[in-house]
Protein backbone atom coordinates (compact mmCIF):
# COMPACT_ATOMS: atom_id res chain seq x y z
CA UNK A 1 0.00 0.00 0.00
CA UNK A 2 1.11 3.53 -0.67
CA UNK A 3 2.78 4.95 2.44
CA UNK A 4 0.77 8.19 2.27
CA UNK A 5 -0.58 9.35 5.63
CA UNK A 6 -4.25 8.48 5.85
CA UNK A 7 -6.38 11.61 6.51
CA UNK A 8 -8.49 10.11 9.26
CA UNK A 9 -10.87 12.09 11.42
CA UNK A 10 -9.07 12.64 14.73
CA UNK A 11 -12.23 13.54 16.63
CA UNK A 12 -14.09 11.18 18.93
CA UNK A 13 -17.22 11.18 16.78
CA UNK A 14 -17.84 10.73 13.07
CA UNK A 15 -20.35 13.39 11.87
CA UNK A 16 -22.45 10.61 10.28
CA UNK A 17 -23.76 9.93 13.80
CA UNK A 18 -25.33 13.41 13.83
CA UNK A 19 -26.47 13.56 10.21
CA UNK A 20 -27.37 10.09 8.95
CA UNK A 21 -29.71 7.20 9.61
CA UNK A 22 -30.43 4.03 7.64
CA UNK A 23 -33.93 3.39 6.27
CA UNK A 24 -35.48 1.45 3.38
CA UNK A 25 -34.66 3.17 0.08
CA UNK A 26 -36.70 3.62 -3.07
CA UNK A 27 -33.39 3.56 -4.97
CA UNK A 28 -32.04 0.23 -3.73
CA UNK A 29 -32.43 -1.85 -0.56
CA UNK A 30 -31.34 0.32 2.34
CA UNK A 31 -30.21 3.91 2.06
CA UNK A 32 -28.70 6.61 4.23
CA UNK A 33 -31.08 9.47 5.03
CA UNK A 34 -30.56 12.87 6.59
CA UNK A 35 -31.83 12.86 10.15
CA UNK A 36 -31.48 16.63 10.21
CA UNK A 37 -31.04 19.40 7.65
CA UNK A 38 -27.51 19.31 6.14
CA UNK A 39 -26.44 22.65 4.59
CA UNK A 40 -24.41 22.63 1.37
CA UNK A 41 -20.69 22.35 2.12
CA UNK A 42 -21.18 20.46 5.39
CA UNK A 43 -18.90 17.50 6.03
CA UNK A 44 -21.41 14.83 7.03
CA UNK A 45 -18.96 11.88 7.01
CA UNK A 46 -15.32 11.88 8.06
CA UNK A 47 -13.95 8.41 8.68
CA UNK A 48 -12.06 7.48 11.81
CA UNK A 49 -9.80 4.39 11.80
CA UNK A 50 -12.62 2.31 13.31
CA UNK A 51 -15.05 3.31 10.53
CA UNK A 52 -13.21 1.66 7.63
CA UNK A 53 -11.07 -1.34 6.79
CA UNK A 54 -8.34 -0.76 4.22
CA UNK A 55 -7.81 -3.70 1.88
CA UNK A 56 -4.63 -3.39 -0.14
CA UNK A 57 -4.22 -4.52 -3.73
CA UNK A 58 -1.95 -7.38 -2.62
CA UNK A 59 -4.43 -8.52 0.05
CA UNK A 60 -7.38 -8.48 -2.34
CA UNK A 61 -5.51 -10.23 -5.17
CA UNK A 62 -4.25 -12.88 -2.76
CA UNK A 63 -7.84 -13.54 -1.65
CA UNK A 64 -9.12 -13.43 -5.23
CA UNK A 65 -6.51 -15.96 -6.41
CA UNK A 66 -7.17 -18.37 -3.54
CA UNK A 67 -9.51 -21.35 -3.62
CA UNK A 68 -13.01 -20.05 -2.88
CA UNK A 69 -15.84 -21.72 -1.03
CA UNK A 70 -19.31 -20.16 -0.77
CA UNK A 71 -18.33 -18.12 2.31
CA UNK A 72 -15.27 -16.70 0.54
CA UNK A 73 -17.33 -15.81 -2.53
CA UNK A 74 -19.91 -14.10 -0.30
CA UNK A 75 -17.15 -12.21 1.53
CA UNK A 76 -15.72 -10.92 -1.77
CA UNK A 77 -19.20 -9.84 -2.89
CA UNK A 78 -19.82 -7.98 0.39
CA UNK A 79 -16.37 -6.40 0.23
CA UNK A 80 -16.93 -5.16 -3.32
CA UNK A 81 -20.50 -4.01 -2.65
CA UNK A 82 -19.60 -1.84 0.34
CA UNK A 83 -16.14 -0.62 -0.68
CA UNK A 84 -14.79 2.10 -2.89
CA UNK A 85 -11.38 2.47 -4.49
CA UNK A 86 -9.04 5.09 -3.06
CA UNK A 87 -6.51 6.05 -5.75
CA UNK A 88 -3.98 7.69 -3.43
CA UNK A 89 -3.65 4.48 -1.40
CA UNK A 90 -4.23 2.08 -4.32
CA UNK A 91 -6.56 0.20 -1.99
CA UNK A 92 -10.19 -0.62 -1.35
CA UNK A 93 -11.87 1.21 1.51
CA UNK A 94 -14.50 -1.02 3.13
CA UNK A 95 -16.98 1.07 5.09
CA UNK A 96 -18.02 -0.59 8.35
CA UNK A 97 -20.16 2.35 9.50
CA UNK A 98 -23.51 3.31 7.95
CA UNK A 99 -21.87 5.24 5.10
CA UNK A 100 -21.90 1.92 3.24
CA UNK A 101 -25.62 2.52 2.61
CA UNK A 102 -25.11 5.63 0.47
CA UNK A 103 -26.79 4.80 -2.83
CA UNK A 104 -25.96 5.99 -6.34
CA UNK A 105 -27.69 8.82 -8.17
CA UNK A 106 -26.58 10.73 -11.26
CA UNK A 107 -28.26 13.69 -9.54
CA UNK A 108 -26.31 13.19 -6.30
CA UNK A 109 -26.48 15.55 -3.34
CA UNK A 110 -23.16 14.46 -1.79
CA UNK A 111 -19.61 13.78 -2.90
CA UNK A 112 -15.93 14.08 -2.19
CA UNK A 113 -14.39 17.16 -0.65
CA UNK A 114 -12.68 19.68 -2.94
CA UNK A 115 -9.27 18.22 -2.06
CA UNK A 116 -10.67 14.79 -3.02
CA UNK A 117 -9.90 13.36 0.41
CA UNK A 118 -11.39 9.88 0.12
CA UNK A 119 -12.21 9.81 3.82
CA UNK A 120 -14.63 12.76 3.76
CA UNK A 121 -18.10 13.23 2.22
CA UNK A 122 -19.58 16.70 1.78
CA UNK A 123 -23.10 17.89 1.01
CA UNK A 124 -22.91 19.21 -2.57
CA UNK A 125 -26.26 20.94 -2.08
CA UNK A 126 -28.63 21.44 0.83
CA UNK A 127 -29.97 18.07 1.99
CA UNK A 128 -33.36 18.25 3.66
CA UNK A 129 -34.45 16.30 6.73
CA UNK A 130 -35.54 12.83 5.57
CA UNK A 131 -33.91 13.15 2.14
CA UNK A 132 -31.76 10.25 0.96
CA UNK A 133 -28.04 11.03 0.82
CA UNK A 134 -26.65 9.93 -2.56
CA UNK A 135 -23.38 10.02 -4.48
CA UNK A 136 -22.65 9.68 -8.18
CA UNK A 137 -20.64 6.46 -8.35
CA UNK A 138 -19.69 7.33 -11.94
CA UNK A 139 -17.40 10.02 -10.47
CA UNK A 140 -15.48 7.46 -8.41
CA UNK A 141 -12.03 6.48 -9.64
CA UNK A 142 -12.08 3.06 -11.30
CA UNK A 143 -9.55 0.51 -10.13
CA UNK A 144 -7.45 -1.14 -12.86
CA UNK A 145 -6.83 -4.31 -10.84
CA UNK A 146 -10.56 -4.92 -10.35
CA UNK A 147 -11.59 -4.94 -14.02
CA UNK A 148 -13.20 -8.37 -13.81
CA UNK A 149 -15.43 -7.00 -11.05
CA UNK A 150 -16.53 -3.92 -13.00
CA UNK A 151 -20.22 -4.59 -12.34
CA UNK A 152 -19.71 -3.65 -8.68
CA UNK A 153 -18.35 -0.22 -9.55
CA UNK A 154 -20.24 0.79 -12.68
CA UNK A 155 -23.76 2.12 -12.07
CA UNK A 156 -24.70 1.64 -15.74
CA UNK A 157 -24.47 -2.11 -15.17
CA UNK A 158 -27.16 -2.31 -12.44
Image (cartoon, helix red, strand yellow):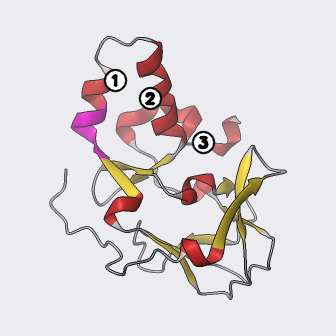
Name the front one of labels 3 and 2.
Answer: 2
Compared with 34, 76 (above or below) is above
Q: Nearer the viewer, residue 134 or 130?
A: 130
- Residues at discs 1 and 2 in contact (Cβ within 8 Å): yes
What is the spatial separation of the Cα atoms under label 3 and label 2, in whole angstroms? 17 Å
Compared with 22, 152 (above or below) is above
Q: Nearer the viewer, residue 37 or 60?
A: 37
Name the front one of labels 1 and 2.
Answer: 2
Name the front one of labels 3 and 1.
Answer: 1
Q: Nearer the viewer, residue 92 or 35?
A: 35
Q: What secondary structure characterizes most of the magenta part? A: helix
Q: In the image, which disc is placed on residue 64?
A: 1
Residue 57 drawn in magenta = yes
Left or right: where 79 falls relative to 158: left
Q: Which residue is mark 2?
A: 76
**Mark 1 or mark 2: which comes first in sequence?**
1
Residue in view at x 63 percent, y 76 percent: 19
Q: Which residue is mark 3?
A: 154
Q: Look at the numbered disc 2 and give the secondary structure of its residue.
A: helix
- Residues at discs 3 and 1 in contact (Cβ within 8 Å): no
| Res 14 visible | yes
- Quadrant of the rendering where the C terminus is positioned: top right
**Mark 3 or mark 2: which comes first in sequence?**
2
Compared with 29, 86 (above or below) is below
Left or right: where 114 falls relative to 131: left
- Please provide the residue range marked out in magenta: 55-60
For the residue carrying disc 1, how many other residues have a C-alpha within 10 Å: few (<14), some (14-19), or many (20+)? few
- Residue 72, how many percent across, how many down? 41, 20
Amino acid sequence: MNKKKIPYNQKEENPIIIYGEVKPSKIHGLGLFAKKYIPQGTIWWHARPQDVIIVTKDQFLNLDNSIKNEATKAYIEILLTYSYYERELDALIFCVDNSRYVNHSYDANSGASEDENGFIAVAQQDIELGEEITEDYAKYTLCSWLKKYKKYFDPCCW
